[in-house]
Image: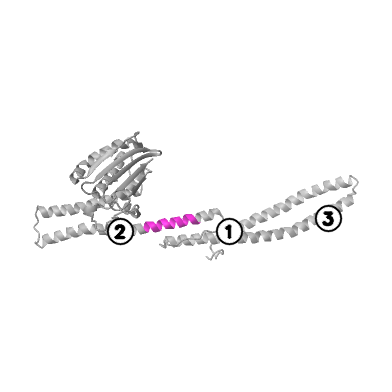
Amino acid sequence: MSRGRSVRGAPLGFTWRLFVSLGLVVLACGVTLLAVALLVAPQIFQGHLRAALGASVEPEVQRHVDEAFADAMISSMGIALPVALLVAFAVTWVVAQRLGRSVVAVAAATDRLARGDLAVRVEVPAVGPELALLADAFNALAGRLADSESMRSRLIGDLAHELRTPLASIEATVEAVVDGVLPADSATLATLVDQTGRLKHLVADMAAVSRAEERQLDLHPRSIDLGALSREAVAAAGARYVAAGVGLDVEAAGPAAVVRADPQRLTEVLANLLDNALRHTPRGGAVRVVVRAGPRGAVVEVVDTGEGFDPSESEHIFERFYRADSSRTRSTAGSGIGLTIARAMVAAHSGTLTATSAGPGTGATFRVELP
């Protein structure tokens, strides 16, 4: 069906339907105007005539005057109504065409978007704020879909890369056992168990980050003291910090920082942040957890004296599998999605997780704000 026209067996297009609808409204208004004028105007005219001439108007003169007035009214309205209808229909047609083109443009762009053209955008029409809002919403939707598709493609590539190492190790070990190069002893089996454990851990991490980012976490919020929760998280990580030769303490001065949240999920957030700080802080360094009540909620900061990062990477480090140092491997830098999981869990509590650093070698600060 071509724009603005109908074909046999097909309904009228948007432009024609809008034109006909507005045309019927204009026609109804014109007919109503004519009917009201013919009913009201003679009474008003006769009232003025009697006021001017008194009651001495002869019946024959009154009849001729009434007929003349009626003829004048009908002739004038007969000329004015078609002219008004033509002008109204012309204006209606122009408006309907502009609205129709805007709607058709959005519909065509939506069809292209549905077919996979994520680069499609529509121009904002100058026909009113409503259609401009529709065009802006469409463009924002197309942009988010393009970002999601880019993230999906990158995720598939990153996941394939992460799976390749343990799978290659398992394959090489099994082939060596089959060829008789390696004995099927406890050491070989331990290697296989270790690699399968890495695979299981990676899959579990991916499932966790998917649930968190899709807001499908099972949250059980209640009032909790972040200071007490932070001290428990620090105590749980204390042995690993001692073994790594990194100092760890907690600072929770001032009024109690009480929020309504799921304590188990926030414990996971702090554990991920402490694990990240430990991986990037060398022996002899220190990590400090600072808890305080803020004007609109509570703040928890994990401050380390470790490697730090370039300020331009402050958002990238929360992406899946992102590592500022490309030489780092999964064994030395974790699964690469701990910070992604932590940010998603904080977002599920309507909070924010940000990271700052003055540059490489200056340490980093991870800041959690909860309402």
Front-most of residues 166 and 88:
166
Expressed as whole percent of the image width and height from the top left, the position of residue 95 reads 60, 59
Residue 140 lies within the magenta run:
yes
How far apart are labels 3 and 1 at the CA level?
41 Å
Q: For mark 3, does the 10 Å Cα neighbourhood hold few (<14), some (14 to 19), or many (20 or more) residues?
A: few
Q: Which callout, 2 or 3, points to the residue nearer the camera?
A: 2
Q: Which mark is residue 334?
A: none
First in sequence: mark 2 vs mark 3: 3
In this view, 367 is above or below 320 = above
Reading the image, the residue beneath label 3 is: 68
Task: Describe the element under mark 1 as helix, strand or loop.
Answer: helix
First in sequence: mark 3 vs mark 1: 1
Q: Is residue 366 visible?
A: yes
In this view, 191 is above or below 51 = below
Q: Amino acid at mark 2?
A: Ile
Reading the image, the residue beneath label 2 is: 156
Q: Residue at x 77, y 57 (%)?
A: 76
Q: Amino acid at mark 3?
A: Ala
Q: Amino acid at mark 1?
A: Arg
Expressed as whole percent of the image width and height from the top left, the position of residue 280 reads 25, 50
Q: Which mark is residue 17?
A: 1
Q: Residue at x 14, y 61 (%)?
A: 175
Boundaries of the magenta span: 135-149
Task: Describe the element under mark 3 as helix, strand or loop.
Answer: helix
Q: Which callout, 2 or 1, points to the residue nearer the camera?
A: 2
Mark 3 near mark 1, Cβ–Cβ under 8 Å?
Answer: no
